[in-house]
């Protein structure tokens, strides 16, 4: 098949809509459901991301996409007991691919609500069982086990979108798109992101451990498929904060840093000790946690409200207590899709435990950025490569 009609484009009024190949067949097969325009944008961008993560690390990879940017991306490293608890997987079997998906979906649960999933490997039963529990639009993978397919086909009363990608498909080297009737053409971004990009370490601290290099590569590959401007924080094989589509670099760094902070605060004893009422919906639980650790915590702790969510009224998680816990987060990697113009980005990154950085370099204020890294003993590599994605 080289053409597929769609219900509509980005919005219901945008008709007609279709996807098609000028030559050859579409590189994916629709096994179940009816993908929409945005679903396919998420699926095809997400597939490229996980394919490259697998190539760079040799590990199974997964991503959770929303509106053409990843909410999370990860490789299949084992989960700690704490991560199993905050990802609500402490009572299930986990394979490497299931670990990757749990990490990708669990990093920013608010943003991942209603996501499109991409998997680097054949979807197995363990991963399908995790997907089954979450609110999601669909999944793309190179294959599905019989058991996984049976589980996924039953989701959404049989309307869950399941796509099978051809892993051997190679797109044309030149890509095109239209805006306002004008056709744009450019060479595809075929940059191979590997450890060689991290060799130019410009700070006093030159030490990049193997784990740091892995996490920096994960951040850069994630940024390659994130709407720019973008910044990505990574720890232990998974993105923990992605700031996408901001007009200023510092807003990217703050947005991603705030998401990384929420991820870490969810692992604190106070949050782990929250006693939710039986039968609370997953989305309500996630939203309540988010509000509890925010400045709006009074919204869920006032009389007549907290009883809807908790068995026992929680204590306030003060800003001082939160800061004390956040200071325990270390060894975070940070990637940026373009240079940092000011040292304020480094100051903000430091507050979220960043110790290693990869960015293109090339700002007239590189000296100031390097000096700020040196103040905190960070190691920073200049890749010389910009990763804008639009």
Image: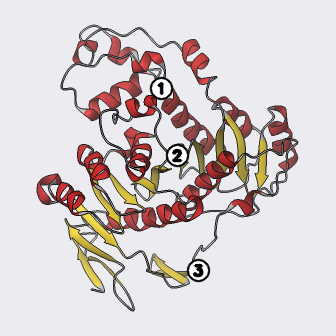
The residue identified by callout 1 is 267
In the rendered view, does 331 fall on the left or right side of 148? right
The residue identified by callout 2 is 238
Secondary structure category for the residue under label 1: loop
Image location of residue 110, percent across then percent down: 38, 39
| Residue contact between numbered discs 1 and 2, judged by CB atoms under 8 Å | no
Mark 1, residues whose alpha carbon is within 10 Å: few (<14), some, or many (≥20)? some
**Residue 47, located in which quarter of the rendered image?**
bottom left
Q: In this rendering, does residue 365 appear at all?
A: no
Q: As drawn, which residue projects farthest toward the left?
A: 157
Q: Is residue 346 above or below residue 43?
A: above
Image location of residue 211, percent across then percent down: 65, 46
Q: CA distance from mark 1 to mark 2?
A: 15 Å
- Depth check, front residue: 181 or 43: 43
Please tell me which of labels 1 and 3 falls first in the chain.
Answer: 3
Q: As drawn, which residue projects farthest toward the bottom?
A: 23
| Residue contact between numbered discs 1 and 3, judged by CB atoms under 8 Å | no
Secondary structure category for the residue under label 3: strand
**Residue 113, located in which quarter of the rendered image?**
top left
Q: CA distance from mark 1 to mark 3?
A: 44 Å
Residue drawn at point x = 45 percent, y = 28 percent: 82
Q: Is residue 330 above or below residue 151?
A: above
Residue drawn at point x = 43 percent, y = 80 percent: 169
Q: How is the image coloured?
A: secondary structure
Image location of residue 232, percent across then percent down: 59, 47
The residue identified by callout 3 is 186
Image location of residue 42, percent across then percent down: 39, 62
Q: CA distance from mark 2 to mark 3?
A: 31 Å
């Amino acid at each position: 098949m080289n053409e597929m009609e769609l219900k509509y484009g980005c919005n219901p009024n945008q008709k007609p809509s279709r996807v098609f190949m000028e030559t050859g067949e579409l590189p994916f097969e629709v096994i179940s459901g009816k993908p929409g325009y945005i679903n396919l944008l998420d699926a095809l961008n997400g597939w490229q991301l996980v394919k490259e993560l697998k190539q760079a690390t040799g590990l199974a990879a997964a991503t959770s996409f929303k509106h053409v940017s990843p909410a999370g991306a990860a490789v299949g490293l084992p989960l700690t007991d704490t991560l199993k608890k905050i990802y609500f997987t402490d009572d299930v079997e986990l394979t490497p691919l299931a670990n990757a998906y749990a990490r990708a979906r669990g990093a920013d649960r608010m943003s991942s609500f209603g996501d499109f999933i991409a998997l680097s490997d054949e979807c197995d039963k363990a991963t399908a069982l995790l997907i089954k529990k979450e609110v999601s639009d669909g999944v793309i993978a190179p294959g599905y086990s019989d058991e996984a397919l049976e589980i996924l086909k039953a989701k959404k009363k049989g309307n869950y979108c399941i796509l099978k990608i051809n892993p051997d498909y190679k797109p044309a080297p030149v890509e095109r798109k239209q805006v306002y009737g004008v056709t744009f053409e450019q060479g595809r971004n075929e940059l191979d992101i590997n450890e060689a990009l991290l060799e130019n370490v410009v700070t006093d601290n030159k030490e990049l451990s193997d784990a740091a290099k892995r996490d920096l590569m994960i951040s850069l590959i994630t940024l390659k498929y994130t709407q720019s401007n973008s910044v990505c924080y990574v720890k232990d094989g998974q993105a923990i904060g992605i700031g996408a589509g901001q007009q200023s670099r510092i807003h990217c760094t703050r947005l991603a840093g705030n998401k990384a902070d929420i991820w870490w605060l969810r692992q604190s004893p106070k949050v782990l000790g929250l006693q939710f009422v039986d039968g609370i919906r997953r989305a309500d639980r996630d939203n309540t946690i988010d509000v509890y650790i925010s400045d709006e915590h009074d919204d869920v702790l006032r009389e007549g409200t907290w009883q809807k969510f908790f068995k026992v009224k929680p204590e306030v998680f003060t800003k001082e207590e939160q800061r004390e816990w956040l200071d325990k987060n270390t060894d975070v990697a940070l990637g940026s899709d373009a240079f940092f113009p000011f040292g304020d980005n480094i100051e903000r990154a430091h507050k979220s435990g960043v110790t290693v950085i990869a960015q293109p370099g090339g700002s007239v204020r590189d000296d100031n950025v390097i000096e700020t890294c040196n103040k905190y003993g960070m190691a920073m590599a200049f890749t010389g490569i910009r990763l804008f994605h639009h």
